[in-house]
Image (cartoon, grey):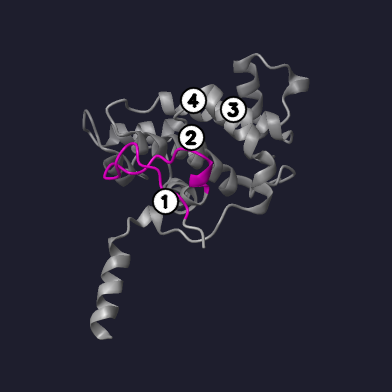
Amino acid sequence: MRRFTLWALALLLAVPAWAQSAGQALPLAGRFQRELLRQAHLQWGLDAPVAALAAQVHQESGWDAAAVSRAGARGLAQFMPATARWWCAREGVADWDCLPHNPAWALRAMVGYDKFLFDRTPAYMHRFDRLWLMLRGYNGGEAHWRAEAQATGLALPTRGQIDAACGRARRAALHCRENLAYPRRILLVLQPRYASWGASWGPVWQPAQQQVRQVRP
């Protein structure tokens, strides 16, 4: 029995951390799945990181289109009013069509804004690390992680080195815990719950084309 217990423990520890997440997609998610898939493939292509995008909505609002945070962020994607106005102006959307509480608008805007942020991450990095920085930018501002990258003093810092520099540039150190936890929870905890929706972009040690699928009883 002891030998079996040790073997089972070793097997569990051998499973990649990002694939160990328990739980399922939230019940509300299903009603928005088709629109998220449509926007993801339209704006990112057929290999869009669908599972990560769905996990982001899960984290932001719990798929509650009427959600309003204490800070004033609204809708499925929790856009702040100023960010929503900036994004609408950039995309040529009229003020009366700038509707963070509208699920279609929120998903279209989040997916598009994510792609905008992703395209501005370092191209030399693995796509998982670029997603990580994209999410840090969505949560706390792109300028902050860029300043932290510069604070490393390295020409081509790794994502880990940029993370380690949090609090050494423009961002106050007290905000680092939340900003670093945001991509960690989305990509390592929540992303596996939505693997059945589409592509999951795993860490650098995960084969690029492998998709983690939920194990169903």
> Does dot 2 land on a helix, a strand or a loop?
loop
Q: How crowded is mark 4: few (under 14 residues within 10 Å), some or many (20 or more)?
A: some
Q: Distance between the residues labelled 2 and 4?
A: 21 Å
Task: Give the camera-side residue of 155 and 121.
Answer: 121
Mark 3 Cα within 10 Å, few/some/many (few <14, many 20+)? many
Q: Which residue is denoted by mark 3 in the rendering?
A: 39
Say what amino acid the circle numbered 3 marks. Answer: Gln
* Residue 75, x across and y down, in percent: 69, 40
Q: Residue 141 carries which label?
A: 2
Horizontal side of 63 relative to 190 (left or right) equals right
Mark 2 crowdedness (10 Å alpha carbons): few <14, some 14-19, many ≥20: some
Label 1 or label 3, whichever lies nearer to me, is 3
Name the kind of residue labelled 4 in the image: Trp
- Relative to 215, 106 lies left or right: right
Residue drawn at point x = 64 percent, y = 46 percent: 29
Say whether marks 2 and 3 touch (CB < 8 Å): no
Q: Which residue lies furthest to the front in this view?
A: 217
Q: According to the image, label 4 marks what residue? A: 44
Mark 1 or 2, nearer chain start: 2
Residue identifier under label 1: 188
- Residue at 25 percent across and 77 percent down: it is 6
